[in-house]
Amino acid sequence: MSFVKVKQVREFDWPLPQYESDGAAGMDVRAVIENKMFTIKPMQRKLVPSGLAIEIPQGYEMQIRPRSGLALKHGITMVNAPGTIDSDYRGEVGIILINLSDSEYELQHGERIAQMVLAPVTRCTWMIVEELEETRRGAGGFGSTGN
């Protein structure tokens, strides 16, 4: 298990994000809204504060992913899914939500809005070559595998 330092940067009265089952990959993140709620109109984007700043170990990232129930039931998802929090970022984690439904959505203070998943980072070094190895697919793009 990896330890991640966390700092509460806004006031809230619920536990820190936690795994809700033994098999859970992500921890739910809640909205910290000063006026206790705000409305997200259809096709509107909002940056929603989490109240948390985190110190991710080098060699890891924190992925921020949408909650499937919120997306299915209300059309609320993330614009940049998955979002990435880099190991050298120390500011408050914000979640960029968008309302893809045709109805306004009232987001409540303390509502679960996203999931955090700690993931290892693999870095690469580019190697310029004249040719790439051939594959059966080749340069076939979108839909080229038959679907």
Image (tube, grey):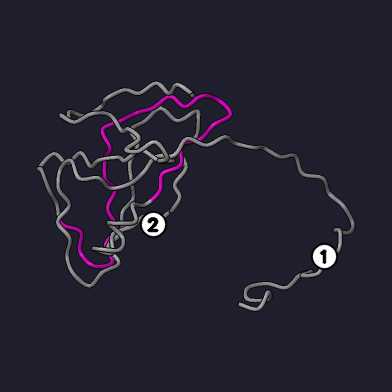
The secondary structure making up most of the magenta span is: strand
Q: Closer to the N terminus: mark 1 or mark 2?
A: 2
Residue type at mark 1 is Thr
Identify the magenta region: 39-65
Identified at 46% across, 42% down, the residue is 63
Identified at 32% across, 32% down, the residue is 18
Instruction: Give the image location of residue 21, x and y in percent.
Output: 35, 38
User: From the viewer's perspective, is the residue at label 1 or at label 2 nearer?
Assistant: 1
Query: As rendered, which of 47 and 110 lies closer to the eye?
Result: 110
Circle 2 residues within 10 Å: few <14, some 14–19, many ≥20: some
Query: As rendered, which of 135 and 11 lies closer to the eye?
Result: 135
Q: Is residue 5 above or below residue 140?
A: above
Residue type at mark 2 is Val
Q: Circle 2 is placed at which residue position? A: 79
User: Residue 40's image quarter?
Assistant: bottom left
Side (left or right) of 57 relative to 4: right
Q: Circle 1 is placed at which residue position? A: 135
What is the secondary structure assignment of the residue under circle 2?
loop
Instruction: Give the image location of residue 138, x and y in percent.
Output: 79, 69
Instruction: Give the image location of residue 130, x and y in percent.
Output: 90, 57
Query: As rendered, which of 59 and 86 lies closer to the eye?
Result: 59
Task: Single out the residue that lies furthest toward the front.
Answer: 22
Identified at 12% across, 48% down, the residue is 37
Task: Single out the residue that lies furthest toward the right.
Answer: 130
